[in-house]
Amino acid sequence: MHLSCCGRGFPAAGAPDRQAGEAPQLLGLLALEERKPKAVVADKGYDSRLIRKALREQLIQAQIPERDLAEGNRRRRKGRPPKVSKELYGQRNIIERLFGRLKEMRRFACRFAKLADSCLALAQFAFMRICLKPYFSDTPSAMCRS
């Protein structure tokens, strides 16, 4: 499952894993976004020339650390390694917490839905539950505070 979220932890777009690699999935998620983000914060799995070039063309800041290479291998890119802001990259925990909330739902965590379409439908129901929970909860949520 590939997922993007806003800075408050609400899901923005999702796509089932189609075994096609990370780069095409990320570019597809960006196409689904209603508003263009200022920055994309992703882990080392999304480090590729294709992604960095596409983000540069759309004037989106890439906060993706470079992959580590096996000892003895040379760098893949010429020039300076990309700079990653520790402050911005530290906000990647927002998406990790969103995945944690998704995994609390047993049906999603155990992958009972084997087809991509049914997995996406299940994820959309989970997203609705996550987004509506602050409005129907008895306890005040951090997302509802101003």
Image (cartoon, rainbow, N blue to C red):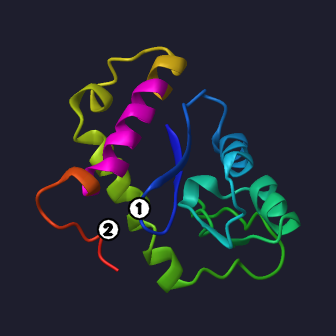
Front residue of 113 and 24:
113
Label placed on residue 9: 1
Q: In this view, does 49 lie above or below 123?
A: below
Dot 2: element: loop
The magenta span reads: 121-134
Tell me the residue that label 2 is attached to.
143
Decide: is 77 above or below 31. Answer: below
For image coordinates 22% across by 50% down, the residue present is 136
Please name the residue shown 82% across and 58% down the image. 54
The answer to which of 123 and 134 lies nearer the viewer is 134
Q: In this view, does 121 lie to the left or right of 93?
A: right
Dot placed on the residue nearer the N-terminal end, 1 or 2: 1
Q: Badge 2, how many Cα within 10 Å: few under 14, some, many 20+?
A: few
Quarter where residue 68 is shown: bottom right
The image position of residue 146, as x and y in percent, is 35, 80
106 relative position to 64: left or right: left
What is the x, y in percent for residue 1? Answer: 49, 37
Alpha-carbon span between mark 1 and mark 2: 9 Å
Of labels 1 and 2, the one closer to you = 2
Residue 134 badge: none
Tell me the chief SS of the magenta region. Answer: helix
Kind of element beneath mark 1 = loop
At x 30% / y 69%, what residue is drawn? 144
Q: Does the CB distance between marks 1 and 2 fall below 8 Å? A: yes
131 inside magenta stretch: yes
